[in-house]
Image (cartoon, grey):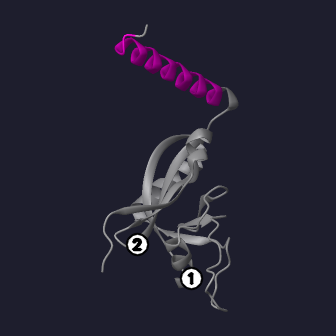
């Protein structure tokens, strides 16, 4: 039976907090059998992961996929460097953007799409601490406005 749709394995919520996201890409990823089995169990961490471009290829580093529990000597190394699969034009665009404007390649999420593992990577510019504070203040203000409107709609104030 073939899988359909999108099933999220892991997402990097901190990335949207630490980076201003400019552009996103969907990439395939080269994995071994035990890695896929471990991912099917829903176990992966994108916390410290980042992508880099070396020799015209994109690599995902520091992605943690725990060893498969039923794996034997064929088991994988949990934090090995894995190759991302993108179109040549996308890779060339990424090389240009990361070199010229100092943008970082950050993985946002990892998911199964029609049975294949995909990684959503983004070009992001690092936020400074005052940017983060401004975002938090704006979010709090919007939440307070929504609460006030909700109370008003219910006739409480």
Please tell me whether mark 2 sits on a helix, a strand or a loop.
strand
Q: Do the residues labelled 1 and 2 touch (CB within 8 Å)?
A: no
Residue at horizontal 38 percent and vertical 73 percent from the top: 115
Say the numbered circle drawn on residue 136: none
The answer to whether residue 14 of the structure is visible from this angle is yes
Mark 2 burial class by Cα count in 10 Å: few <14, some 14-19, many 20+: few
Q: In this view, does 82 lie above or below 26?
A: below
Question: Is any part of residue 103 visible from this angle?
Answer: no
- Find residue 84 and report its horizontal and vertical position in percent: 51, 68
Report which residue position mark 2 lands on: 116
Q: Which of marks 1 and 2 is nearer the N terminus?
A: 1
- Residue 103 falls inside the magenta stretch: no
**Residue 49 position within the rendered picture, expressed as x and y whole percent measured from the top left:** 63, 59
Q: From the image, give the main secondary structure of the stretch colored magenta.
A: helix
Residue lying farthest to the bottom in this orientation: 73
Residue 38: % across, % down: 56, 75
Instruction: Kindly identify which residue carries mark 1.
Output: 34
Q: Is residue 139 left or right of residue 72?
A: left
* Secondary element at tag 1: helix
Magenta-highlighted residues: 131-155
Residue at image position (33%, 73%) is: 3
Q: In front: 136, or 119? A: 136
Distance in Å between CA atoms under marks 1 and 2? 14 Å
Q: Is residue 19 above or below residue 95?
A: above
Residue nearest the viewer, comparing 10 with 83: 10
Residue 135 falls inside the magenta stretch = yes
Residue found 54% across the figure and 82% down from its top? 32
Quarter holding residue 128: top right
Task: Where is residue 131? Give x, y as percent.
Answer: 62, 28
Where is the N terminus found, in terms of image quarters?
Answer: bottom left
């Amino acid at each position: 039976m073939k899988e359909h749709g999108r099933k999220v394995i892991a997402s990097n919520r901190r990335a949207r907090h630490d980076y201003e996201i400019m552009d996103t890409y969907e990439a395939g990823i080269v994995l071994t059998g035990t890695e896929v089995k471990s991912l099917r169990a829903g176990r992966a961490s994108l916390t410290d992961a980042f992508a880099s471009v070396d020799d015209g290829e994109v690599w995902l580093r520091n992605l943690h996929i725990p060893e498969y529990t039923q794996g034997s000597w064929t088991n994988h190394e949990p934090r090995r460097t894995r190759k991302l699969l993108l179109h040549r034009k996308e890779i060339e665009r990424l090389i240009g953007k990361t070199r010229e404007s100092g943008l970082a390649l950050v993985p946002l999420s990892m998911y199964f799409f029609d049975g294949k593992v995909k990684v959503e990577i983004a070009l992001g510019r690092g936020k400074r601490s005052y940017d983060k504070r401004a975002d938090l203040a704006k979010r709090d203000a919007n939440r307070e406005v929504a609460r006030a409107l909700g109370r008003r709609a219910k006739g409480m104030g």
